[in-house]
Amino acid sequence: MLTRAGVVVRDQTVLLRGVNDDARVMKKLMQELLRIRVVPYDLFLCERVEGILHFCTTVREGRRIMENSRAIPPVWRFPGPLPTSPAA
């Protein structure tokens, strides 16, 4: 395993409506990541592209989830909306 070799493994999570857009789900995800020695690092918003719009959340929803999940460690940083495509 990478962590046993001293490699720092970081997680980048995409916030998806109906999948992980709940503070309890995010809390569990963070706990499990830390349990396996993976550092929660970034939370991204889903790209607004055709075919996956039903998974997209808003910045407001993301911030609400972060505020409501006290178990999210301070190393996690919420960057807000990321201009990942022209449609963002």
Image (tube, rainbow, N blue to C red):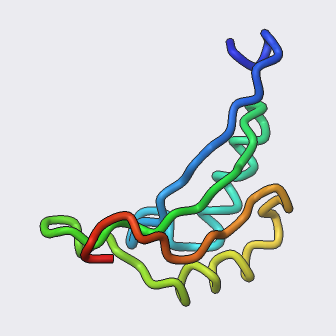
Residue 13, above or below 7: below
Query: Would you identify the image quadrant in which residue 56 lies?
Result: bottom left
Question: What residue is shown at x 70% (from left), y 31% (from top)?
Answer: 9
Residue 55 on image: x %, y %: 31, 70
Residue 88 is drawn in which quadrant?
A: bottom left
User: Relative to 34, is 42 above or below?
Assistant: below
Q: In which quadrant of the rendered image does the N terminus lie?
A: top right
Of residues 18 and 60, the one nearer the viewer is: 60
Is 29 located above or below residue 2 in the figure?
below
Name the residue: 64% across, 52% down: 29
The location of residue 40, given as percent across then percent down, is 71, 49
Residue, x 79% and y 12% (percent of image)? 4
Give the side of residue 31 with respect to residue 87, left or right.
right
Residue beneath the point at 14% across and 69% down: 50
Q: Is residue 59 left or right of residue 34?
A: left
Q: Which residue, as the protein is rendered here, is positioned at the far left? A: 51
